[in-house]
Amino acid sequence: MGGKRRKPPAGRSSPTIRDVARRAGVSPGTVSNVMIGVRGVRSDSRLSVMKAAEALGYKSNHMASSLRRGHTRTIGVVVPDLSNEFFSGLVMHWEAQAAKAGYEILVVSSGDNPDIESRRIQSLIARRVDGLLIAAARDDFGAAPGFPATLPPAVLVDRASGHKRFDTVSSDNVAAGYEGTSHLIKLGHRDIACLTSADSHVHLRDRVRGYRKALKDNGLSGRERLVIGGRSVDACRVAIEREFRLPARPTAIFATTFFSTLGAIKAIHAFDIALPKDVSLVAFEHSEWMTVFQPYLTAVAQRRDELAANSWSVLIDRIASPHATFRRLKIPITLSIRESARPVSN
Amino acid sequence: MGGKRRKPPAGRSSPTIRDVARRAGVSPGTVSNVMIGVRGVRSDSRLSVMKAAEALGYKSNHMASSLRRGHTRTIGVVVPDLSNEFFSGLVMHWEAQAAKAGYEILVVSSGDNPDIESRRIQSLIARRVDGLLIAAARDDFGAAPGFPATLPPAVLVDRASGHKRFDTVSSDNVAAGYEGTSHLIKLGHRDIACLTSADSHVHLRDRVRGYRKALKDNGLSGRERLVIGGRSVDACRVAIEREFRLPARPTAIFATTFFSTLGAIKAIHAFDIALPKDVSLVAFEHSEWMTVFQPYLTAVAQRRDELAANSWSVLIDRIASPHATFRRLKIPITLSIRESARPVSN
DNA sequence: GCCAGTTCGTAAATCGTTTTACCACGGGCG
DNA sequence: CGCCCGTGGTAAAACGATTTACGAACTGGC
């Protein structure tokens, strides 16, 4: 009762720049100048502002500031699946970059579903992220009917390499396929199965292209054995097991995805095939558990740190100059020769 | 030259509620009412507003709205390390919860360093997150001198279980230790090494307490063999290798962390010990690669989905009623009996 | 002592939304 | 007919920061 207020105080909320100004005996504008220092402030007022802010525990309201300045210093990150080590690795690198540059990242996952992806991106747009780092669900990213007509600056990472309307940063997947296959050929293998998860994405098709090219360069074009498993470990296992039942079993397997690596190992165990004695395996990706797996897997691995660092800086450049021509970066891959691929034994 | 403008238009930025209002021939207030529908709007004006919004591609500016409404519908998530599958799993579950409830999550990682953690939390506060989900770097979370005096509603997850000033949700780590150990005892083991990464955190100490309790309940108190490795795979490996050099080698190992699981396996391989013939192993956590590892590891695993779901709802409750008494939830763990623990063989 | 130039403080406008306070209109009722 | 009430529209005041425009005080040079 008593004086009538417009707004109930709702407990005690954070101190504002006005509170600081009042306490320091200056105007809000001056406080602002102390905080972000675009203009000179006499050292005595500066000091009293700092003291007042300290005493009140003042933290600038980032939303208010963003609203006025027209940018949020937030980058939206869209990945298919955070439980996938490759993507969580990327996210971690990006987060480190962001922290260093005074940004924050807003992570959403799409479950590899273009509809969900589109919805999650809408909400990132509503939050006015300054840029977008996207591992797209599909190669034709942005083509669906309900898709937002204008996007903030965005770069496509890992997937949809070479997209016409965006910067892209991805591994050199053709090289990945080529190097993995060549390694097996050099070891004398002629019957090399290439196990992949799908043929729906460029990055996967590129790996297969690399495989084909390596066969061709070594006069092995006729010996192609492409096995398309599916998007799960067990689909890959089943597919390669079919291959194992054939009269001429492959002497080597090149797994071009992480799932297919797991599927291949499962199948090898199920068929009691000795790895690497009876079959050689080139795996895809690296992961800490591989250090306890026997034999230590020879593998092609993407360079997550470089992928993340390059895509970050391409995005920052894009934000700075929205009309520059698109860039398409290919990051080299790493072939780590270890124990699971051996010279062919017949 | 020409008319002087206050602000250069900076390209074309997003349409505002005013643009929609103008185009629909109504006032901004009416547009707002159409959008969030707190008051009735006649159906003809409603329609023209919708049409205008559609035509302009209007997306509400979330920052402006947050500023006015006093909440952001974003939850800050603080984890030590996203490349750890346990945490990325939690984050993914939280993200799903958030999406369902119309929230977004802001993920930061602390690298298990209290200073970084504190700084990252400061920046989450500046962004005025509505709540915080924290896997704390240390048990005395919030005690450091520079720590913000007041925090938004927060719940401590996994770590720092039972903290005095926060809600906590964590696994029943004593049960985890107890069940893992009991399983080995039931198999006849008397010489059980308990391998852990550190004794600096309650959640780790609780697992050891469970181990001790299981020994005690079975009259084995004198046979305690606690091995404290360190916070890396190799530190754990080295520690357990020391144990292997002792005259009486343990017949079973209970690894109480993911790192120590990996370290134990590495040591077992290095010493050419047959697993599970010569030594039994109870591992910690579950991960997809375990399905291709031989023998299939018997393991104690935390229930990430329940941890995430419960901590989420505790946080939402806390936001709704800031003054309710603290809750301390313990989530049961799962013991999956598989092949790496066998009856003792002498 | 005066003028130009610099420094720094302040008031007020602004960002885009939500919400309050007010008003106009029309219908129902005594 | 006059009143009351419900409905729905609008103008304007927030939210909390930044920034512009202005002016006061001071400096230095002549």
Image: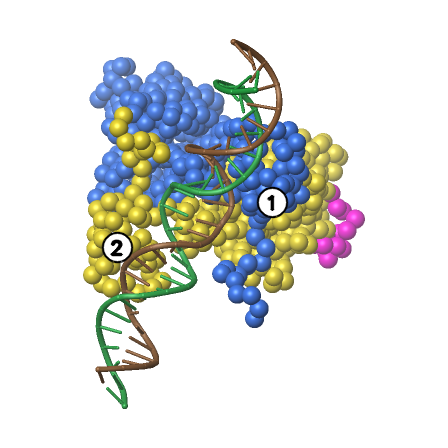
Chain colours: A yellow, B blue, C brown, D green
Residue A143 visible at all: yes
Q: Is residue A267 magenta?
A: no
Q: How many C-alpha atoms fall within 10 Å of the one at disc 2: few (<14), some, or many (≥20)?
A: some
Q: Mark 2: which secondary structure?
A: loop
Decide whether the magenta segment is chiefly helix, strand or loop. helix
Mark 2, chain letter?
Answer: A
Q: Mark 1: which secondary structure?
A: helix
Q: Residue at x 74, y 34 (%)?
A: A246
Q: Is residue A215 magenta?
A: yes
Residue A262 rendering spot, x and y as whole percentages: 58, 36
Q: Residue furthest right?
A: A222
CA separation in Å, label 1 and label 2: 39 Å
Residue type at mark 2?
Val
Nearer-the-camera pick, B120 or B301: B120
Q: Residue at x 40, y 27 (%)?
A: B316
Q: Which residue is mark 2?
A: A26
Q: Which residue is mark 1?
A: B22
Q: Which residues are magenta?
A: A213-225
Q: Residue at x 67, y 43 (%)?
A: B55
Query: Closer to the observer: label 1 or label 2?
Result: 1
Mark 1, chain letter?
Answer: B
Callouts 1 and 2 close, C-beta under 8 Å: no
